[in-house]
Image (spheres, grey):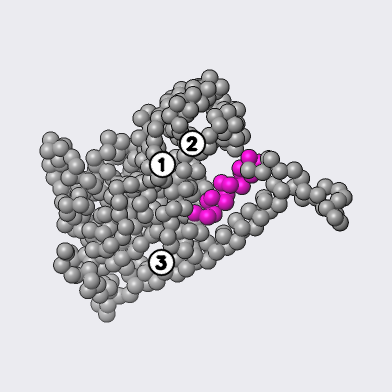
Amino acid sequence: MLVGVAIGQPAGFDASLDELALLAASAGDEVVERVIARRRAPDPALFVGSGKADEIKALAAATRADGVIFDQALSPAQQRNLERHLGVAVADRTSLILDIFADRAHSHEGKLQVELARLQYMATRLVRRWSHLERQRGGIGNRGGPGEAQIELDRRMIGERIKSVKERLEKVKRQRGTQRKARQRRGSFRVSLVGYTNAGKSTLFNALVKARSYAADQLFATLDTTTRSLWLGPAQASASLSDTVGFIRDLPHKLVEAFEATLQEAADADLLLHVIDAASPAWAEQQAEVERVLAEIGADGVPQILVFNKCDRLEATQQPREAADWVEAPGQRRRRRVFASALTGQGLDRLREAIAEAALAQPPAADAPTLPDGSPARPAPDPEALAPAA
């Protein structure tokens, strides 16, 4: 069962719970019922209040639901109380996203990042996990005064593991920093794909660089950052194109912290391709959420090209009049906007031209290699990037 609670006047509240349903499907769950509740403030004990909790309990029994997923974050006490009251497993949006990330991470770095986020999340819920255990007793023959409680032991073990994972992630972060500095010395123009999850970033990445990264019509299909060379014909230069993890509404802050090494690719880029699902009715809210996360990681000052993807799904009356134009927003710099379809190839030539224009307008780095006449040296073209498209 899915449960959404509108607290006061929620901004961006998903009254249909469609996004939560997609998250549940990505985790392998089958949705049997949806419930919407409205409250002025969350109930401290049961989040939805006792009356609504009784209604959810009856619906769970009638539909034989194995668990209940809330669209908001629950406190450890609320989760514990709801499980006791409902008699089924209870999860919140944060734990659901963490489960998906744990299942999708394949690289060493991705697994470390997900493990850190899950450990930090678990550390706040040890009371619920270990409340049934009594304090361990120390001394000879298991006698004597009280010893270390199981919860204290578990907290210490998790704390040590968190410290170990953070140290390993710091090493990964330094390695990524070294790789970025090497690209800077080569004078490579760095481009990163960002956007809401399932906006088509991986499909666009594959179409631009002829790669075979995993892409699927599901949330968080790929988590691991992939970087390939992109040849820019008009600029007679190659750029490094990176595909990053997608964003989502109410992305857990611990996940943003854990994926700092990955998200740093966006913060250090010379250009961001902000991929937007043009066919989504909530594309404006999704764009605003991506902008918020970019500001949180310090990437809001990086130049952007807005790529309205999936134009092939638009009706004939909704198709754009031009393949590309410029758009202005209050408090933001003027941005190039390109309408494309990574699936059909619509607008991709115009997108490559826009990237090349941005690369030519980028001033060379102070330590970038130059030719004898003082002009910036262009990296040699990538033979694979020059290969004709399939």
Can residue 172 be seen in the rendering of this structure? yes
Q: Which residues are magenta?
A: 114-128
Residue 54 percent location from the top left of the image: 53, 22
Can residue 266 be seen in the rendering of this structure? no
Marks 2 and 3 sit apart, C-alpha to C-alpha, by: 44 Å
Q: Amino acid at mark 1?
A: Asp
What residue lies at 34% left-to-right and 72% top-to-bottom? Answer: 186
Marks 1 and 3 sit apart, C-alpha to C-alpha, by: 39 Å
Q: Which residue is mark 1?
A: 29
User: Does the magenta segment cover residue 115?
Assistant: yes
Indicate the secondary structure of the residue bearing disc 1: loop
Residue 221 percent location from the top left of the image: 35, 52
Please tell me whether residue 210 is drawn above or below residue 119 in the rendered image. below
User: Does the magenta segment cover residue 1?
Assistant: no
Neighbour class for label 3 at 10 Å: few (<14), some, many (≥20)?
some
In-image side of 172 versus 210 (left or right): right
Indicate the secondary structure of the residue bearing disc 2: strand
Neighbour class for label 1 at 10 Å: few (<14), some, many (≥20)?
some
What residue lies at 81% left-to-right and 49% top-to-bottom? Answer: 137
Q: Nearer the viewer, residue 299 or 387?
A: 387
Residue 208: which numbered mark, if any? none
Q: Quadrant of residue 371?
A: bottom left
In-image side of 87 versus 109 (left or right): right
**Residues tagged 1 and 2 counted as in contact (Cβ below 8 A):** yes
Give the farthest residue toward the bottom: 372
In-image side of 251 versus 351 (left or right): right
Q: For the N terminus, give its image quadrant.
A: top left
Residue 67: which numbered mark, if any? 2
Marks 1 and 2 sit apart, C-alpha to C-alpha, by: 10 Å
